[in-house]
Image (spheres, grey):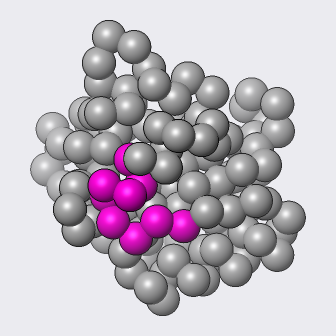
């Protein structure tokens, strides 16, 4: 099943707009949420192929969203991949906990739209 629908949960308007514009241009169906609560609700209400999840968000942190979706006895998003995006240097323990539940972990400062698309294509080929 190829990645077609993407939920971007990112509060930085510049970065969010850049990701959404480049993803839509590449042919993906993209929704964008700016705060953590809205992002969690969207992720629960629609089956996305991929979530791009920022760590530092208003209302609810990315790690809390990931915990809510994949931390319980049941994976609430079994058909979704999750890429965590952050500029925030986390301690190893937090990062490892998130990496266990996510399918990828990217440092925003290093990600250009073309690199992001390449990572998505790579995730797509692993299905």
Q: How many marks?
A: 0
The reply to whether residue 86 is visible in this rendering is no
Q: Position of residue 44 (x, y in %)?
A: 47, 38
- Looking at this view, is 16 or 33 the one in front? 33
Question: Which span is picked out in magenta?
Answer: 32-40
Q: Position of residue 117 (x, y in %)?
A: 72, 63
Q: Check the image and name the residue furthest to the top.
A: 73
- Looking at this view, is 36 or 102 the one in front? 36
Residue displayed at 30% across by 33% down: 68
The reply to whether residue 76 is visible in this rendering is yes
Residue displayed at 30% across by 24% down: 71
Residue displayed at 23% across by 43% down: 64
Q: Is residue 17 above or below residue 127?
A: below
In the picture, measured across the screen, residue 100 lies left or right of residue 20, that is: left
Residue displayed at 63% across by 27% down: 79
- Residue 72: image quadrant is top left
- Looking at this view, is 67 or 89 the one in front? 67
């Amino acid at each position: 099943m190829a990645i077609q629908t993407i939920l971007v949960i990112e509060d930085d308007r510049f970065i969010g707009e850049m990701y959404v514009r480049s993803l839509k241009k590449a042919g993906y169906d993209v929704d964008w949420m700016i705060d953590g609560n809205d992002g969690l609700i969207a992720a629960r209400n629609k089956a996305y192929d991929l979530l791009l999840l920022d760590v530092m968000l208003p209302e609810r942190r990315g790690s809390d969203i990931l915990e809510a979706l994949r931390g319980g006895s049941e994976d609430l998003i079994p058909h979704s991949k999750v890429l965590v995006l952050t500029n925030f240097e986390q301690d190893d323990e937090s990062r490892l906990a998130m990496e266990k539940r996510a399918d990828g972990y990217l440092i925003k400062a290093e990600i250009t739209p073309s690199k992001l698309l390449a990572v998505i294509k790579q995730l797509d080929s692993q299905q």
